[in-house]
Amino acid sequence: MTEPVQTPQVFPTRIFSGIQPSGGLTLGNYLGALKRFVEMQKDGVETIYCLVDMHAITVWQDPAKLRQQTYEAAAAFMAAGVDPARSILFNQSQVTAHVELGWIFNCVARMGWMGRMTQWKDKAGKNSENASLGLFAYPALMAADILAYKATHVPVGEDQKQHIELTRDIAQKFNNDYGVNFFPVTEPVIEGAATRVMSLRDGTKKMSKSDPSDQSRINLTDDADAIAQKIRKAKTDPEPLPDTLDGLKERPEARNLVNIYAALAGTSAEAVVTEYAGAQFGSFKPKLAELAVSVLSPITTEMNRLMQDRAEIDRILADGSDRADAIARPILDQVYDIVGMIRSRRR
């Protein structure tokens, strides 16, 4: 007798992504994540967005600041256009399926896989013996964040692509180990003119909320004057803008400002260099500042308004966590059955 052929499972499109509330959000978070999250809110596509506070504590956080930053990040999501009625918005620690599945994935993932993660190497550095176990293992929790919802697509920046590849490895190993076709092989979504926004002070480094220099970044809480001033003072070079992108290959600061302009304007970097070919940065920067203020100021204003009503943010996050749990809990219960755990059924 021949074995029955297992029918491949078809997974409905579901998008998941998250941001750590471990510091004030920046222009990089807006262009690389929030703007894309809003664009993905389409009819018929389920979008789940998470404030990954469990990831934040892989390095020590001041409790009061973490709480404040979580509220601020939730306000930023909504001010940027993430609609809690169309998307699920919640903070990770309110849905226990993340850490429960994370432990199972700790037992699926291999030490060697974790040790090869470049972000682990970068963050732990030579002091790895004193780094937290959570920092080492957090890619498995990230895989659980995604696969607790059987998410098929994850919008990420280039620096997170390796973690999505690990998520794929974990999903495939789980499926192979247990002879099931249970988890999808998630696809990273990396696109846009500024998926990796660089520092305004050093075009070879990513714009970061942890950079000691506030001049290196534009914060979503900056007012119009601060935004314009930071762009005027952004590091550039003395050469004019070229007429092709090839002319920016060895000019990281120039390329960064062109990418930022393109992303804010919703156009391509090629179109920007065509429009401003031959222009000096003395004339380009004011145009960029004007554009940045026009896009970001309404977001800052709305964030400030939302932060005046934390009870409403609490309500939105609680509703989002209930909706997220309703998806993740049945998936996790099936995982427990697959791995052979006896569990009393919830009434």
Image: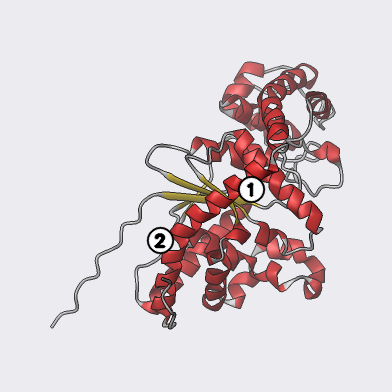
Callout 1–callout 2 Cβ contact below 8 Å: no
Q: Where residue 300 sits: x, y (%)? A: 71, 31
| Nearest the eye: 301 or 242 | 301
**Amino acid type shown at disc 1:** Asp
**Residue 173 image-quadrant placement:** bottom left
Q: Quadrant of the C terminus?
A: bottom left
Most extreme residue toward the front is: 347
**Residue 233 image-quadrant placement:** top right
Q: Where residue 141 sits: x, y (%)? A: 59, 66
Rounded to the nearest angstrom, the CA distance separating label 1 from label 2 is: 32 Å
Q: Where residue 218 sits: x, y (%)? A: 76, 35
| Nearest the eye: 138 or 159 | 138
Give the residue pinned by disc 1.
Answer: 314
**SS category of the residue bearing label 2:** loop
Q: Which badge, 1 or 2, comes first in the chain's sequence? A: 2
Query: Is residue 120 left or right of 186 when viewed as pictured?
Result: right
Q: Quadrant of the N terminus?
A: bottom left
Give the residue pinned by disc 2.
Answer: 184
Query: Is residue 110 left or right of 311 when viewed as pictured?
Result: left
Q: Look at 45% across and 58% down and name the residue there.
A: 326
Q: Look at 31% across and 57% down and name the residue there.
A: 10
Q: Look at 63% across and 34% down and name the residue there.
A: 79
Q: Where residue 163 sits: x, y (%)? A: 58, 60
Query: Is residue 6 left or right of 315 when viewed as pictured?
Result: left
**Residue 267 image-quadrant placement:** top right
**Amino acid type shown at disc 2:** Pro
